[in-house]
Image (tube, rainbow, N blue to C red):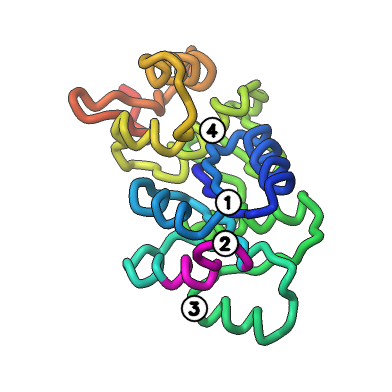
Amino acid sequence: MKVLVVEDEKDLNRVIVKKLKVEGYSVDFCHDGEEAMDYIRIADYDIIILDILMPRKNGYEVLSHLRGGKKKTPVLFLTAKDAPDDRIKGLDLGADDYLVKPFHFGELLARIRAMIRRNYDTVSNQLQIADLILNADSHVVMRADKIIGLSAKEFSMLEYFMRNEGVVLSRQQLEEHLWDFEYQGASNMIDVYIRRLRLKIDKDAKPKLLHTVRGVGYVMRKEKTV
């Protein structure tokens, strides 16, 4: 899942980004509203965490710009402004949730998971395809009742596939959702992680779930065994 963190307090911004990356999220970040608009123009995010009081453009202006462009990306306001009128204004402009500083990081993660559920129209943080089960709360993955150990990035890729069951995802979509703009790794990282996932979830298992669509990308779906 890909997150944009827009927070002008650099220390807080750094902490949020670091902790989200540990959880397996792909994270871009910036410190003012105008820069946030630039990121929004060139990338699609699963979640935007947005401060209100910022230089150049405030959070309300950024949100208005986002919704004016017909983008439905879930937005969580993260701010010190806790007056009812402030919350009402943000929600009326199209914010999806509101968290007041200081906050517990566990609550932030729970709110992010809830927004992702709503965005993908699911009612649970437990996803299942055939006998493969992923729990987004506990970060536990099982197949045929056996726990599968995944790295944070492998977990993130699997979750993205499972939330888009039956949808063919291109290499570009996978790169944009799983790596941030600062990533400068090898060009074959998608291939590396696809191989790792297949070894862990599909080896010696039926039906196979992760499929290649030649010339297009990859898809996760249950196919009948022969």
Label 2, on which residue? Answer: 55
Which residue is rendered at x = 66% and y = 58% of the image? 111
Q: What stretch of residues is rendered in magenta?
A: 53-64
| Residue 226 left/right relative to 13 | left
Q: CA distance from mark 4 to mark 1?
A: 39 Å
Q: CA distance from mark 1 to mark 2?
A: 8 Å
Q: CA distance from mark 4 to mark 2?
A: 46 Å
Label 3, on which residue? Answer: 93
| Residue 27 left/right relative to 12 | left
Q: Which mark is residue 132?
A: 4
Residue sitting farthest toward the left: 215
Mark 3 or 1, which is nearer the eye? 1
Q: Mark 3 touching mark 1, by CB under 8 A?
A: no
The residue type indicated by label 1 comes to: His
Going from N to C along the chain, the mark reached first, 1 or 2, is 1
The image quadrant of residue 132 is top right
Which residue is rendered at x = 46% and y = 45% of the image? 163
Tell me if residue 55 is in the magenta stretch: yes
The residue type indicated by label 4 comes to: Leu
Q: CA distance from mark 3 to mark 4?
A: 39 Å
Q: Foreground: 60 or 88?
A: 60
Q: Position of residue 168 (x, y in %)?
A: 29, 37
Q: Position of residue 126 (x, y in %)?
A: 60, 46
| Looking at the image, residue 205 lies above or below residue 127 | above
Does residue 131 show up? no
Q: CA distance from mark 2 to mark 3?
A: 19 Å
Q: Mark 2 touching mark 3, by CB under 8 A?
A: no
